[in-house]
Image (cartoon, rainbow, N blue to C red):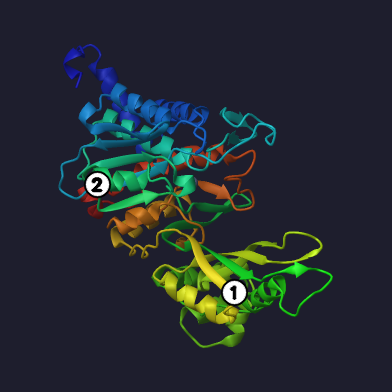
Amino acid sequence: MHSRFISHVHLPRLLLLAALTASLAANGQTPPAAQQLTREIYRELIEINTVTATGDTARAAQAMADRLLAAQFAPADVHVFQPSERKGNLVARLRGTGARRPILLLAHLDVVEAKREDWTVEPFKLLERDGHFYGRGTGDDKFMAAAFIANLIRYKQEGFTPDRDIIVVLETDEEILDRNKVGMQWLIEHHRDLIYAEFAFNEGASVGLKGGKALRVGVQTSEKVPVNFLLEAKNPGGHSSLPTRENAIYRLAAGLVRLGKFEFPVQLNETTRAWLERAAPLEDAQTASDMRAVAAGRVDAGALERLSSKPVYNAQLRTTCVATLLQGGHAENALPQSARATVNCRVLPGEPIDEVQKTLVRVLNDDQIALTPTWIHVSSAPSPLNPEVMKAIEALSARFWPGAPVMPSMSTGATDGSFLRNAGIPTYGHSGLAMNVDDIRAHGKDERILLKSFYEGVEYLYELVKMLSTGSQAQRPASQ
Ligand SMILES: [Zn+2]
């Protein structure tokens, strides 16, 4: 620390500043200097192109490491790993008393491609306009990355000693679910000791806003598993002027029609049951009563039918498999020798993939249609609802977004939280970022988030992590 350099003349002013900073923090407001730093870090991250295929996450990881080192973090606590060219991961640690096991804060550095000609603004420049921050990654996922780094620096500057280490991991290649094993899987394999934690926060659920009002605060505990199957029917083919009864396209088409009429059975877990119960009050009377009936396990065919007709609810109730690509034949005047379809499934966590495959074979009901899994993302069991985590989120959310229920959720898309869950670290998708539910632009063009949500979310994450790393928090009032 530098306190020995401070003369007594300056001490009262410093104390005043410290008191002011403390009172600002107590009121849930980020001190201006911390706000500015967070914005600078955010800008730096947005303006480093980290598109998964062509960008440079190693540069972004190093830039964040430099920030931490400049803020007096020990080099032994700041690691940049570069498993391959342009691919970087950062692991940083704020040391605590060690009374409890660490907490892990995870964000990904890579972003989805953004073509200048598709956008109306520069994708790799942070732009502030109409109450928004624009730029690729503003929401997915550089908000969390910037907030975690800036907050870690803020804790350090305040001299905060957590009762557990706070680990920040910024990883690469999440957007392709770490297909080349240079991101989270690499870290788990090579540096498990550095990232080991009691639980983790990751992307996966945000705060839903509608008309400026917070609807719900999401806590993602679980994700469905994406699996692709290739279906293929073959035939010797021939001249189309001499058609045969046997036809690869007809065979495949008939199988797909059977699949289109099929629904997997309803199966709820702790998360989806809680989600249905808590989302019910936000719906109209009929839907609410249907949701409660299904959550309670009551046999009510009407309720199930009505809920299943809505894609968002249907996806929570069951595994889904849908045809997404179709291809067949080789010439306009030839009988098809082959017809192929891709079926994309989103499998409920815990449901064995080979069971899903058996079900598909039974439904297609044609031994001439070959079925092959072409891609299976890792499956992970839902993270249990940790009471300490849920209590902290509920207390803090009540202050930041009064009246919005905290809702455990299962993503129908995938993140690499699954790798962490399988490594024994319960993982909660919880960004603290309030986003307009009608203006979701992640992966799309002109990605943006609300300025207000940015500052609010940074402060929320600051307080949440502090609450969960302060031993006496249970005795303190949860709100001011
Ligand atoms: Zn993301």
Judging from the image, what secondary structure is the residue with disc 1 in? strand
Image position of 460 (left or right of 125): left
Q: Residues within 10 Å of mark 1 (few under 14, many from 20)?
A: many
Judging from the image, what secondary structure is the residue with disc 2 in? helix
* Alpha-carbon span between mark 2 and mark 1: 43 Å
User: Which residue occupies the foreground of this view, 46 or 214?
Assistant: 46
User: Where on the picture, by quarter, is residue 134?
Assistant: top right
Q: Nearer the viewer, mark 2 or mark 1?
A: 1
- Residue at 21% over, 14% down: 6
In the image, residue 269 above or below residue 442: below
User: Where on the picture, by quarter, is residue 195?
Assistant: top left
Q: Percent x, y for residue 41?
A: 43, 28
- Residue at 50% over, 39% down: 52
User: Which residue occupies the foreground of this view, 302 or 473?
Assistant: 302
Q: Which disc number belongs to residue 369?
A: 1
User: Where on the picture, by quarter, is residue 458?
Assistant: top left
- Residue at 19% over, 45% down: 163
Q: Which residue is mark 2?
A: 192
Kindly check if marks 2 and 1 are in contact, taking CB atoms under 8 A apart as contact.
no
